[in-house]
Image: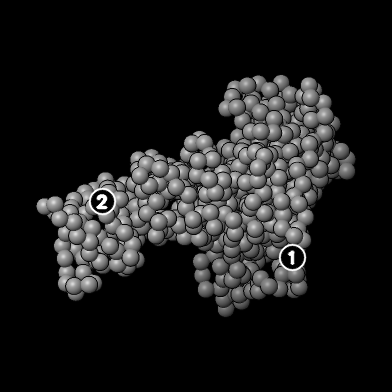
Amino acid sequence: MSGTLALASTIAEMDRDALRALVARRRPQAAGTIADPIGLAAELLRSDSITRAIVPLERNQLSALLRFAAAPHSCAPDELQPLTALGLIGRESEQLLPLDEVTETVRDALISAGIEPDSLTAAGATPDAVTASHTSGATPAPEPTPRATAAVPHQAPDTSTWYSPALTAVGQAAESLRMLTLRPGKLNRNGTVAVASLRSLAEATSIDVDSVSRIVTALGHAGLTTPRSDEQLLLGSAAAGDWLAQDNRDRWLTLARSTLAAIPAPLNIALTAADGDLAGAAAAIPHRFPLLPPAELAAATAFTAVAEQLGLTVSGVISAPADRLIADDPAAAGELVARDTPGLAPGVYVQPDLSVVVPGPLAPADEATLSAISRPEQIGVASTRRISEASLAEGLEQGVTPDAARALFGRISLTGIPQPLEYLLASRAERIGDLVVDEHDGDVGRTRITVSRSDLAQTLLVDRALQHLQLTRPAPAPNAPVAMGTPIRLYSRLRADHVVSALTDARYHPTTSAALSGAGRAPGTRGASPAHTLDTAAIPIVDVSAAPQATQLTEAYSTLVERVYLAARAEPGTGEFTRRLELAMRDRSPVYVTAEARGQVRTFTLLPVSVTSGRLRATDQVAGVERTLPVNMITAVEPV
């Protein structure tokens, strides 16, 4: 009872901003049922609520809670202020009080983590240098190992090679984003990308699976992908086209800013004391935040891997442009990026074996067209791609005709157009329209396949790799004339995009009427079916983003803040006696109420029923009658 009253007193003293911050950080679960400080205090003193509140605390804050419980005058006010704001310290008669519920939960949590609570309050243990003393049978947690760069105190770590992973990551991100636009990935029920989709994306982009996972994470932070939770699909977002239209430098700055903004809170706190050593900060987290759950430790480690891949760090140390972004100086970061990264490459080298060497960044439009008609073999500062009949077929589906491909290479190839490539382009141009797939609205199927040759149509009907399409060829109408060279039409009950994928996988290289008519989209942005409409308000893909700001409250929480704030200042609900009566009503427990009138003092054993309009209505459990007392006459309220 005392813990609830003491915390309610703390809450009653808070202004709106402090109350909003408390609710935002504690997120009480029963928001709709809380009407006053007593109700909020009771909710925040639940064991699960306290546990959620203390999990992200630093070791010195946990130590302060335990030291304050053992000796209330042993802690400085600046140590207690953030803990009071978090609803972990109570108040009575202008004095701060420890809360037994909080102390018990902290001790239990430390013991569960293998840490002896008394080690945090031992004599000589400073807030920043408290060593974990583990229970019997457990191995003591080692102190964070100093990184190698700390051995040379006056020599700054060399991060000048940051641009190499940065440019590689930008190329990987662009390739992955285009592929996700063409072929949406699959999501698990929890919103993360399915392993099978990551493997498929890795195979299509020639990037290893771990790197693809980190790139997809960075794209999610930047809002360049969007998940559709209703269909469990991952697609390129509405912002993807604008990002792909930027040059490599602006692309990197976008990825870098959004990734740094998503740094996990514990890692961000640890980084402030790590002198730019992100890997060292991550290594220090288990000691600095002893109650942090494994999932959050893993999130911090995962973030360091993403940062390293993007060139935000080099060997774990923050790179120069990333440091400027952290300092909120984007102009200086842009200058460093412009200084350290190369400009546009003069062109590409097309080899007779149909491989293409790209020695550096290309103009975004040229990069998009080249990406549409070739597949990556190696992505880096200098990349290698390969042209094939299949890649040209996919390029045609994206609106890049053989003539457009020939024009591109005529402009950017530093080695001309080799004869094998010329032959491939000419051959592909001759066969345009052999196999055209379109949506169909009719009883025979959802998709129509127009085939230019009867032998090709017969092959499709008997190909075992296409059996799942259930292709049919309706019989011609009786006595209907059939002209020589008339295209043959086959039908499938599957969607058009499924049919296109199946035919492509079976190496038939289909196209669509839209591509043939010149209505193809810009390369790399092939339209999805209506079922794949983008949902820019969807949930994030990867949950390693920064914690929400304190002001970001839902309507239910905002309403809760207002109810509690007004209740704390309404008459007669501002007094300690009233809060004791409210708590007794909440617990349905009797209390001793002492009242004074005309010089007479009497004490009643009452079961409070209501406190309204400045009056207490209660049942006298001794006399068996109902009494009504003015609150301003009450001089004491004590538990029975």
Left or right of residue 555: residue 548: right
Separation of residues labelled 1 and 2 (CA atoms): 85 Å
Left or right of residue 19: residue 140: right
In the rendered image, is residue 60 in sight?
A: yes
- In the image, residue 581 sits, relative to residue 407, either above or below, namely below
Q: Residue at x 27, y 48 (%)?
A: 574
Query: Residue placed farthest to the left in the image?
Result: 598
Q: Residue at x 62, y 62 (%)?
A: 188
Q: Nearer the viewer, residue 466 or 410?
A: 466
Circle 1 SS class: helix
Circle 2 SS class: loop
Left or right of residue 592: residue 315: right
- In the image, residue 476 sits, relative to residue 245, either above or below, namely below
Sequence-wise, the earlier of marks 1 and 2 is 1
Q: Residues within 10 Å of mark 2 (few under 14, many from 20)?
A: many
Tell me the quadrant of the picture where the N terminus can be found.
bottom left
Residue under label 1, please give it. 456
| Residue type, mark 1 in image | Leu
* Rendered location of residue 316, percent (x, y): 75, 37
| Residue type, mark 2 in image | Gly
Q: Nearer the viewer, residue 442 or 85?
A: 85
Tell me the quadrant of the picture where the C terminus can be found.
bottom left
Closer to viewer: mark 1 or mark 2: 2
Residue under label 2, please give it. 573
Quarter-of-image position of residue 582: bottom left
Q: Nearer the viewer, residue 318 or 638?
A: 638
In the rendered image, is residue 294 in sight?
A: no
